[in-house]
Amino acid sequence: MDQAEIKSRESNGAKKTTLDAVVIGAGIAGLYQLHRMRQLGLKVRAFEAGSGVGGTWYWNRYPGARFDSQVEVYQYWFSEDLYKAWKPSERFPGQPETEQWLNFVADRFDLKKDIQFSTRIESATYREKDGRWDVVTSDGERIDTQYLLACCGMLSAPLNDRFPGQSTFKGVITHTGLWPKEGIDLKGKRVAVVGTGATGIQVIQTIAPEVGSMKVFVRTPQYVVPMKNPKYSQADWDRWSSRFNELKTRVRSTFAGFDYDFENRPWAELTPDERTQVLEKYWNDGSLSMWLATFPEMFFDEAVSAVVSDFVRDKMRKRLRHDPKLCDVLIPSEADYGFGTHRVPLENKYLEAYLQDNVDAVNCRKTPIERIVPDGIQTSDGKVHEADIIILAVGFDAGSGALSRIDIRGRDGRSLKDRWKDEIRTAMGLQVHGYPNLFTTGAPLAPSAALCNMTTCLQQQVDWITDCIAYAKKHGKGVVEATKEFEDNWVRHHDETAAATLVVKTDSWYMGSNVDGKPRRLLSYIGGVGNYNRQCDELAANGYQGFAMT
């Protein structure tokens, strides 16, 4: 540890450490936040629950795990040399390669020396008398820090205790977000997969050829888009590298932080044939551009949503060979929800997996899961679906869950967990009123909570937080807190923006609907990444109005 750190021993023998900043997490945001704090010359340490760096790319090592942002924009933008130094193997690399990349970044900037691994932050309590935080780790260390920088991840609180009777199961049961490092032998086994979101889809399409049999428990069918994932040569990467500055600027201004955007002519100005041509073009691109670069009207206009949704449904029906049972279970109906109001998964022969003789789909809308029993999964019709291995692809307590699982107490000892049980609110996803010097990335009410290419939005937030702290230090201020008025205004703007869309009419993890008792509010700001960034820039240019400094 840094020799400048002040260490003492408390009477009970617990170690006490004094720091300027604590970073929670060593994923995309945490690594960059650690780097930026060191650039400010602060005494900083990051704490990571895993044994290595990577965040979501450390924990999510299930079969088939890969990101669905193109690798040329899923990047750090603070170093052109870094961008050029790592050559990805394909457009959408898998988890092992992404974890290697993040270790490459950490080693290149010597970040690991300031990361404490296999350590969770258990609690953090704000001291009003001097504007600092008392932090306690899972190994009992007590830390006195001025700034608490939460880079916990928006999808890092797995819902792993989901069904009654899980502990009675005689076989292997695991959540995709907690997949064991040593892996699981699936060959020839009877496997049950619960959930068909983006993660479940990746697992299903990957393991279908090797398992003995697989039953997929489907509650909410998904619209899917086929992924096109070409290999990248050095020449390909050199071409992308030559566009570094262009891409760096571009991703900050688009709706979702990618290098593509809604730039087609308005829906109303096109003929039906012209609309279809646009949809076919982006469908064939094999990326999230089908969702985030075709027609923004699909988010607001039910008639447009219906046409786009039926386009996707037709593509899916053909791949399922118009099998009526499979189409009913796997394709959303007009009555379910529209394309794009849920997270849109990219896939590779996912639908074709159900055409295999060893794969069956269980319709959980007709026969919901009641419990897990020693031999498998029992549904409401009394049937026990026997299994050797149960894979829970049931998602996360998104946006708010990671922070809610830490006992964070701000002014007057107010619990953040209790506050968010009543209502999930933040000031632009950067701070929460009542919790001074707590800064957040990937938190609710910012694009980074869901609707963004994560590297774009997380870096923008880290840079804003770093610049805010630098501004406070320059002006001799030690405490930064979003005012109640500013937070109220942001929540109002967030809700008004969300209410204009069809997204809020759909039950999904975007709305917190996947967690019993979670307050209903769109977790992610849907006003666009470019718009959000402009508002953040304006705040900084105006001396961080809305953020009180003392």
Image: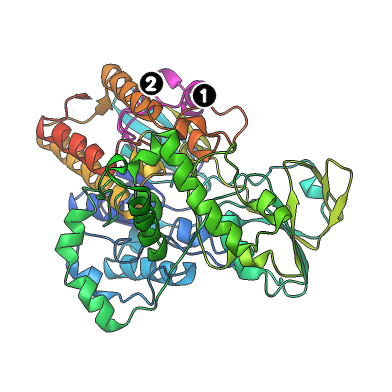
Indicate yes or no whether the magenta region holds residue 216. no
Indicate yes or no whether the magenta region holds residue 432. yes
- Residue 10 visible? The answer is no
What element does badge 1 sit on?
A: helix
Residue range in magenta is 410-439
| Res. 75 mark | none
Q: Residues within 10 Å of mark 2 (few under 14, many from 20)?
A: some
| Chief SS of the magenta region | loop
Q: Residues within 10 Å of mark 1 (few under 14, many from 20)?
A: some
Q: Is residue 316 above or below residue 16?
A: below
Which quarter of the rendering shows the N terminus? bottom left
Seen from the viewer's position, the closer of residues 516 and 141 is: 516
Seen from the viewer's position, the closer of residues 417 and 334 is: 334
Q: Position of residue 381 (x, y in %)?
A: 87, 42
Point out the tag, 1 or 2, that comes first from the N-terminus. Answer: 2
Which quarter of the rendering shows the C terminus? top left
Q: Which residue is mark 1?
A: 418
What residue is drawn where x is 77% and y is 74%? Answer: 188
Q: Quadrant of residue 497?
A: top left
Q: Quadrant of residue 125?
A: top left
- Residue 530 visible? The answer is yes
Q: Is residue 337 above or below residue 28?
A: above
Quick one: which residue is furthest to the bottom in this view?
Answer: 234
Give the Cα separation between the discs numbered 1 and 2: 13 Å
Q: Please state if 147 lies on the left or on the right of 67 as rendered.
A: left
| Res. 411 mark | 2
What element does badge 2 sit on?
A: helix
